[in-house]
Amino acid sequence: MSEHIPEDVIAKIFQRLPVKSLIRFTSVSKRWRSIILQDPHFAASHYQIATQNKTLSHSVCFRGYFDSDCFFESQTTSSASSPVVKTDLRCLFNGENIERYIWNPSTGLSQKLPDPGVPNEFQIFTGFGYVSATDDYKILIANSRLEEGEQSKIHIFSSKSKSWRRIQDSQYSGLSMSVLGTLCNETLHWLRFKQDIMVAFDLADEKFRTMALPVVEEYGGHYFGHLGDFGGCLCVFGQVDVVAASIDLWVMREYDKGNSWTKLFNLRISDQPDKQICYVQPILVTETCTFLEIHTESGSDRRVAKLVKSYHNELKIEEVHVDRYRHGMIGYEESLLWHEKFEVYTCKSKSEDQMKWNQFWGS
């Protein structure tokens, strides 16, 4: 019957359906698969409508250490977000070589990137984003030998030129920078821990600058630990209060306005404050809750990893324990956005884990 429905009518119906449903529909026919996975205009329209209607859904992908990368696809509460592309950038390690891919976790499609030609150095910080004015995806990597006084070598990959190029070296180097840049306003952002400042890189003009963090005098510096995105605004997390088992969430309400920082929430991260919390990593921030990866000590020097959902406006958390060999999580927005000449990259998941995660995320 679908063969008698005009393609533009099918596309208009599909544009209002969730990504998970559309991925299932790709097995119905070659025609449907072509519309859903091979039409960049449809993908862009679908993303734009979901953004406008505030129906974008979020998921988390899981990095395994001792086997193939694992991807647990589970829907969270839909929430408003900024109209920017957030296709996840994955780096796959193969022996001493680093293979880099642009990968959309929702569709499983990926494109292998050419080697930037930076051997025998540490990759100290990186980032990925989109420049709307030129319709260009850009990737930044900063490499260094970590020698004292050495500047970072900055390489940029452009999807339009399909090549890497080196730009002016950066003074930001060493291990005091957060690794993965947070994208906001077509600009990448990192924390510089020792100085309690935020470093920004404008993807359009390809220049670094610094931005102000909130002033929290009672902590005397070294207070902020993680950057994130809250409804299209930059957010930053304070250090964990181990006694209260909580963490502060600050939001920059006006971009690049230092006086617009506001502490919105004090997030609960455990129901047992006396437990030894040794690692906290925010994964994803939605309107109603924040997801965090948390490790605690559990006797005999053994760490227990779990994913915690902390609600913003109530003292309530939910949690699920994680295989300690599979921790390392990245939150992302579900979309069909893609780039030319994608290759198929498939991920494995276990049915038992899938059921546990679907229950946790409410899908």
Image: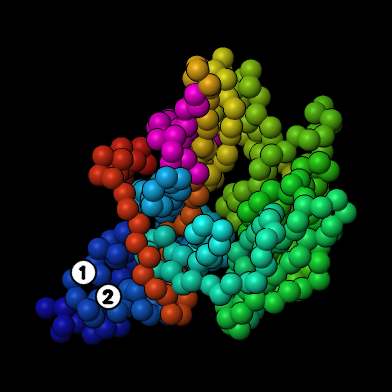
Query: Up-down: is 316 above or below 333?
Result: above
325 part of magenta stretch: yes
**Residue 173 place in picture, x, y as percent:** 78, 54
Residue occupying the point 53% across, 65% down: 100
Q: Horizontal and vertical percent for residue 277?
A: 58, 24
Which image quarter: residue 223? top right
Count of numbered tags: 2
Q: Quadrant of the C terminus?
A: top left
Residue 136 visible in the snapshot: no
Q: Residue furthest top?
A: 274
Q: Residue at x 25, y 63 (%)?
A: 24
- Residue at the right extreme, as displayed: 149
Q: How is the image coloured?
A: rainbow
Q: Secondary structure at mark 1?
A: loop
Is 17 placed above or below 342 here?
above
Would you say 310 lies left or right of 118 here? Answer: left
Q: Which residues are magenta?
A: 302-328
Residue hosting label 2: 33
Residue with the mark numbered 1: 27
Camera sees residue 237: yes
The reply to whether the C-beta atoms of the residues labelled 2 and 1 are less than 8 Å apart is yes
Q: Residues within 10 Å of mark 2 (few under 14, many from 20)?
A: some
Could you say which is closer to the camera, residue 47 or residue 306? 306
Name the secondary structure under disc 2. helix
Q: Quadrant of the N terminus?
A: bottom left
| Left or right for 81, reference 67 | right
Name the amino acid type tagged 2.
Arg
Residue type marked 1:
Ser
Residue 98 locus on image (x, y percent): 55, 62
2 or 1: tag closer to the N-terminus:
1
Percent coordinates x, y for residue 127 in the rendering: 63, 61
